[in-house]
Amino acid sequence: MLNQFQAFILGIIQGLTEFLPISSTGHLYLGRHIFGLDEAGIFLDTMLHIGTLLALLVVYKDDIIFLLKNPFSKMTLLLIAGTFPAVVAGLLLGDWFDGLSKTGVTIGWEFLVTGLILWLADGVRKGSKSLNEISIKDALIIGTFQAAAIMPALSRSGLTIAAGLFCKLDRATAAYFSFLLSIPAITGGIVFQMKPIFTGDVERLPITALFVGTLAAAIFGYIAVVWMIDFLKKRSLKIFSIYVWALGTIILFMQVTGKF
């Protein structure tokens, strides 16, 4: 049964890895597996994602207010275009990807792919497009990368930031738009996960532990968003590539040797 300490640690993992380009889903799977909480998946993940959504609502409060006041703005169209591929992927392939998330059989390879994409994106010639210069085509490309990140250990933030760099966005804008685009993505994911929760087809978990995990995810998610946008202005993504390559290699070795 989930306790408050485990929930706190998993909240930290979710908050940091949702916005660092290293895959929150993959790390949460590993964290639950270590704590022996494999059956706590959907309900726990939903609450932790609510925490990271709260962090985004705080960071992007001005943008959200602008979008509510200007529902037909260019940014609204960009967010719709960027979200559309993920909606299609979720509707057509959601059950299959959910099965992969539960087994974790492919996460080692997915960590390696995430690292490769980050490494390639970091080597792209520096772009200069600002937030106002993002096109519908750019948003669709970034959204397609986001759709691919429905795979358990393909980092959503990593792939969308990489796609932004491929589209010649400047580095801070690539991170900023990636996280802004994650608001409808995370919201949609939460709504999609609500059905089994309302039908009672999930393990019951202690309310206090869920509150602690959600709060930790919100606090550390806020820290990660602000830090990552600033980090990408001056630093390389390759450090994250090395990390996920090392993690993926360890997981694959443990799978081959029957220890995972």
Image (cartoon, helix red, strand yellow):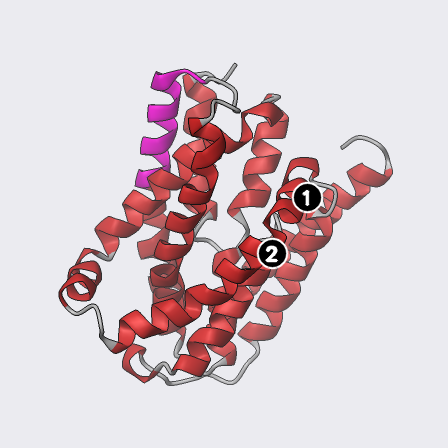
Is residue 206 magenta-colored? yes
Cα gap from disc 2 to disc 1, whole angstroms:
15 Å
Asked which quadrant contains residue 258, the reply is top right
Question: Which residue was labeled with disc 2?
Answer: 92
Tally the marks. 2
**Quadrant that contains the C terminus:** top right
Question: Which residue was labeled with disc 1?
Answer: 100
Residue 163 % position (x, y): 51, 72
Residue 163 in the figure: left or right of residue 95: left
Residue 124 % position (x, y): 55, 81
First in sequence: mark 2 vs mark 1? 2
Nearer mark to the viewer, of 2 and 1:
2
Residue 6 shows in the view: yes
Which residue is depicted at the point 59% across and 24% down?
Answer: 39
Residue range highlighted in magenta: 205-219
- What secondary structure is the stretch in magenta mostly built from? helix
Is residue 113 magenta-colored? no
